[in-house]
Image (spheres, helix red, strand yellow):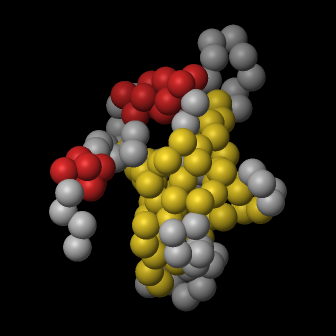
Amino acid sequence: MNTSASAIEQRRALRKRANYTVAVTDVINDRFLGHLGNLSATGMLLIGPGAPRPEAVYQVSLGLPGLSFPGANTSPLSIELGVQEQWHDAAATPGQVWSGFRIVSISPADAALLEAWLALPGGKE
């Protein structure tokens, strides 16, 4: 078990549940990976149709419901993240897998959007 200070800090990061269906897409292969379970400044939980490759790195895109520019269309703003698989396990629902990912890369602009979304009320874990 990894008990380093950074591993403990990542696990303790404020997580926010996705109160809406948020699709997560592999940008490189333009492939649906699953739906967002929760998201923090350091990682995310994904509920998908299959297991990711162990320790694989993905470039993903996802929308942040409730976060949009005033006066713009009502579509949620999207961010891109580089994430690395940390673990996965079969879900109670047949054909679904829960997967934990660590954020390994995010642009400063997308990090600011993520922080703004995390600060919105509701869904804290």
Q: Is residue 92 visible?
A: yes
Q: Up-down: is 84 above or below 76?
A: below
Residue lying furthest top in this view? 71
Q: Residue at x 70, y 32 (%)?
A: 75
Residue lying furthest bottom in this view? 94
The quarter holding residue 44 reads: bottom left
Q: Is residue 113 visible?
A: no
Between residues 57 and 32, which one lies in front from this camera angle? 57
User: How far across and how far down the image is residue 95, in percent?
Assistant: 60, 85
Between residues 58 and 121, which one lies in front from this camera angle? 58
User: How far across and how far down the image is residue 48, in percent?
Assistant: 59, 70
Q: Tell me: 90 left or right of 53.
A: left
Q: Up-down: is 41 above or below 103?
A: above
Between residues 27 and 98, which one lies in front from this camera angle? 27
Q: Residue at x 80, y 60 (%)?
A: 29
Residue lying furthest right in this view? 30
How many tags in the picture? 0
Please state, as top left, top right, bottom left or bottom right, where the N terminus lies in the image: bottom left
Q: Up-down: is 38 above or below 115?
A: below
Q: Residue at x 59, y 60 (%)?
A: 57
Q: Residue at x 40, y 34 (%)?
A: 118
User: How far across and how far down the image is residue 107, in percent?
Assistant: 58, 30
Between residues 82 and 75, which one lies in front from this camera angle? 82
The quarter holding residue 23 reads: bottom right
User: How far across and how far down the image is residue 39, in percent?
Assistant: 43, 48
